[in-house]
Image (cartoon, helix red, strand yellow):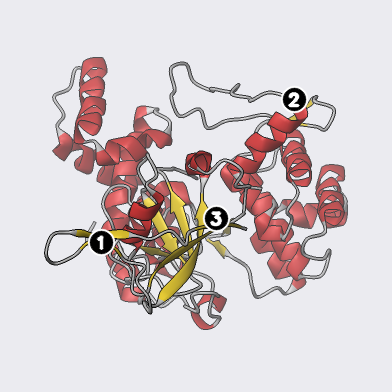
Amino acid sequence: IAGEAIFEGNKERLGKELYNHACSPGCIIQCSNTWHRPDGTEHVSCQEYESVWSLGANCGIDSLDVTGELIRLCNEYGLDTIEAGVTLGVAMEAGLAEFGDGEGAIELMHEIGKGTPLGRILGNGAAVTARVFGVVRCPTVKGQGMPAYEPRAIKGIGVTYATSTMGADHTSGYTVAPEILSVGGKADPFALEKGELSRNFQVATAFIDSTGHCLFIAFPILDIAEGFEGVVEECNGVLGTNWTMDDVNRIGLEILKMERAFNEAAGFTKAHDRLPEFMKYEPLPPHNVVWDVPNEVVDAVFGGA
Amino acid sequence: MAAEGPQALSRQAPNGAWRLSHTAGEKRITVHVKLFTTLRRYRPGLNIGETLSVELPAGATVEQLLERLSLPEEVKTILVNGIVRDGAHAVADGDEVGLFPPVARG
């Protein structure tokens, strides 16, 4: 179900290689795609990495036709694909379907669309579903389902999940870049002292998000200093400012402070900056590691901010 | 499963002369390599999910494995048995090595 399989599957069904879906003019990454049925007609757009993980691998489902249909239903019903996949995983843990049961997953998704009592529970997401069915293994923070990166084995992204104002959101501070992909430096994924790394990524991300750029520009500009400076110059050109890279940190931090002030006013405390308890005592194979980053490290991320 | 080898790995001897390492009695190991995304095109016929078996001298590093494969593209991410490693990491018999070009996700 990886990207290679999407490419090969389309090629087999269409009889040609398909490069068809740049969502922004001039983009050289072109991460979007379309998926085609055996008869060549378009099934869905798009089979994105997180969506295929959450609705596929996370649920033990290894068919791109099934993940394609589940994504199509998310698009039709207006559901976030990560949250929907994490919710289906929790539903499978609760026994509503077997892991790997694609047909069962599609039926559960239709329950949401029909607005049945079960569908309303599932439609409220993973945390509500886990609470209703008494599921302990519920991978959420602040009520938001975790994406495709396991915090027990990648500590920095766990610090981001814990401290992000939105909950378990990888895009708010993607430390996976240095921890796994060797982008923006290198960091040992198992090392516990990740407070500064997570904060730096969250600050830079808050700035990039505010520019309106696609976040995927972060991958090249984290490794190419002139790229990031170019973005700052671009902002100066549009806004008439004289910002430097120092202002990137200042502005990013100001945005995060504002978000955290909003959360505090809404009743969030550091007790909400925590990963699910089961991750502290259930080791994750094949690494056999638990979530062991001390609370003090997590609380220090924005402790002085 | 495709296999590469047992062709010998060339390396420099202390006297500066090139020699073949596959000398009699030297211990050999086999690692199983997965080439991801664009790297797979350098081994036509290798299907998605298939591994390439590569024979190396015992104690060989990932760097030596990369020299052996001589892929004409940057290898950015190296996973040995699912854990991120660098070129200096010594591989062991039976290890699964995943190689990625620069990629981004999420």
At 69% from the left and 51% from the top, the residue drawn is A55
Query: Disc 2 vs disc 1: Cβ atoms closer than 8 Å?
Result: no
Q: Nearer the viewer, mark 3 or mark 2?
A: 2
At which x and y percent is residue A296?
31, 74
Q: Are marks 1 and 3 in contact (CB under 8 Å)?
A: no
Callout 2: 10 Å neighbours few (<14), some, many (20+)?
Answer: some
Identify the residue position indicated by label 2 in the image: A14
* Image side of residue A210 versus residue A35, left or right: left
Residue at coordinates 63% horizontally, 45% vertically from top-left? Answer: A51
Q: Which chain is home to disc 3?
A: A
Subunit ID for the residue under disc 1: B
Q: Position of residue A300 (x, y in %)?
A: 27, 67
For mark 2, give the secondary structure: helix
Front residue of this view, candidates A13 and A63: A13
**Quadrant of the image occupied by residue A35:** top right
Work out which quarter of the rendered image holds the C terminus of chain A and state it. Answer: bottom left
Q: Which residue is mark 1?
A: B19
Q: Chain of mark 2?
A: A
Name the amino acid, label 1: Arg
Q: Secondary structure at mark 1?
A: strand
Residue that mark 3 sits on? A148
Q: Nearer the viewer, mark 2 or mark 1?
A: 1
